[in-house]
Image (spheres, rainbow, N blue to C red):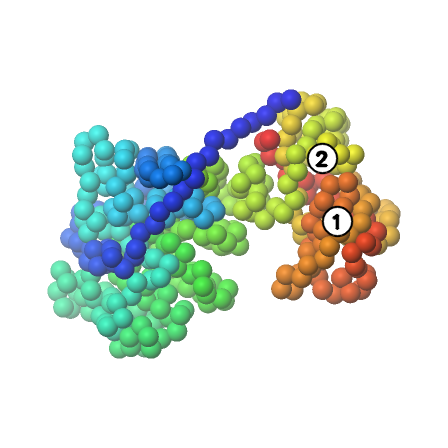
Amino acid sequence: MSRVKFKHVRSIGTVNSSEVTRNLVAADTGNTTSPGGPGLSARIQKVYKSEQDFVLDVDFSAASGFTILFGPSGSGKTTLLDCIAGLTKPACGTITLGQQVFFDAQTGADLPVPKRNVGYVFQDLALFPHLTVEGNLAYGLDRLSASDRELRIASILQTFRILDLRRRRPREISGGERQRVALARALVTDPCILLLDEPLAALDTVTKSRILDDLRTWNEAHRIPILCVTHSREEVVALGERVIVLDRGRIVAQGTPHEVIGAPRQETVAQLAGFENIFDAIVESAHQERGTMTCRLNRSEVLLETPLVRAEVDSSLRIGIRAGDILLATVRPEGLSARNLLPGKIVALARRDVIIAARVDVGVEMEVHLTLAARDALGLAPGREVWLVVKTHSCHLMAA
C-alpha cells in the first residue's frame, strides 16, 4: 500500500509585547525603506532547545496585500512574526523586504528593530495606558516636525474613525476602539510591513468586519505586505489573498483560501479547516467513465463513492468530510443525486451553542451537525436508527 509521510516538530515560545512595544512604535521615520510595493522574502531557521526541541524552518515570500498565517497553537506563527520584526534572531537564513536586508546570517546583517520600520499589533494591543489616543499615535513620530506630526495623526484618526477619541485614554474607550487605536498607532509611521498577531480575536463579527474594511481601505493606498495570524477559518476566507499554513514549525500548505481551506490535501489543514470526520481509507475501485472511485473506510464494510484522483487500487489515503455537509434522515431517502446513503444508529447527541452534534455509527462513527429545530422535528435521540446522505464531492481526499 502506498503512503505519504510528513515530518513534524513541536513549537514553543512567545514574546512579551509590553517589553518591546516602545522599540516598535518608535520607528525611524527617516528609514529609506519606502512603503508601497516591495515584497517580503523570508528563509528562516530558529531552534529552541528544550525537552522536545522546536525548530522553525520556513521559506516563503509575501507580496503586498494580506497573507494569512494559519495553524494550531504552538506551530510557530508568533515566532515567525518576531523574527521578521527583529524581536527574535534566527539561527540562520535571510529576511528581505524589496532591496532592504533585515537579516542575513551569512553576512552578519541584522537591522535594528526601529530601522526595520515594521508595524506590529499584538494580541494584548500594548497601548500606553497613561497616554491619550493622540499621545499613543504621536509616540513614534518625534522625528517629524510638529505640523507634519499633526497632519499624519489627523489623517490616520480619520481613516480609522477615531477622530473624536483623540483626547481619551485607553481605559476610557471600548474594546473595538482600542483595536482601532492599536492599528492606527502601528500604521501612523507609514511602516513597510504590518504584522498582526490575532489583535481582533476578541471582537464580535460586525466590529471586526468594519475594522478590517478600514484596514483594506488604508492598504489600497499604501500596498504593503500584511501578515495576519488567525485561528479562524472564517477570517482566512474573508481576509486572505494568500494563506500559509504552519504546523510544528514547518509550512505544510500555501495558496489561495479556496485551494488551502476549501480543498485541503493534508490532514492537519483539514482539521483546521473544520473537517470533523477524517478516516483512513483504501481505494477499492476506480470508475473513469463517471469520474469517481470507491473507497473502503478504516478496514470496515463502509464504502464511499468519492471524486476520482490519481491513486492506484489498494493504495491508502485519507478522506475528510465536514459534519455540516452530511444530511440525516429518519427514513430511507429515495430519488437522490447523492451517491452515498449509509444506514446507522445515533450514538450520542450534544448541544454546541445553536448546533446539535450527532455521533452516528454507520460501521464507522461519523459526526453530523444539525439545527435544534431539526433535532426536535425528527425526534432524534440516542439509539434512533437513521440514514446519512453524503455527496460525492463532500468527500475530500488527502495523502495518507
Q: To which residue does mark 2 refer?
A: 297
Residue found at the far front of this picture: 51
Instruction: Work out whether 164 lies above or below 108.
Output: below
Q: Position of residue 370 (x, y in %)?
A: 71, 58
Residue 201 appears left or right of 311: left
Query: What residue does disc 1 label?
Result: 360
| Callout 2 amino acid | Leu
Q: Where's the C terminus, which quadrant? A: top right
**Image height of 7 relative to 208, above or below:** above
Residue drawn at 78 percent across, 48 percent down:
388
Left or right side of 281 for 261: left
Residue 228 in sight from this viewpoint:
yes
Q: Earlier in the sequence, mark 1 or mark 2?
A: 2
Tell me, yes or no, if residue 38 can be seen here. Answer: no
Helix, strand, or loop for circle 1? Answer: strand
In the displayed structure, 123 sits above or below 54; it is: below
What residue sits 79% from the left and 59% below the top?
381
Tell me what residue is drawn at x 66 percent, y 38 percent: 279
Closest to the observer, 278 or 93: 278
Residue in the image at 65% along x and 64% along y:
354
**Could you say which is closer to the camera, residue 140 or residue 76?**
76
Task: Name the image quarter holding the N terminus.
Answer: top right
Query: Residue 47, labelled with which disc?
Result: none
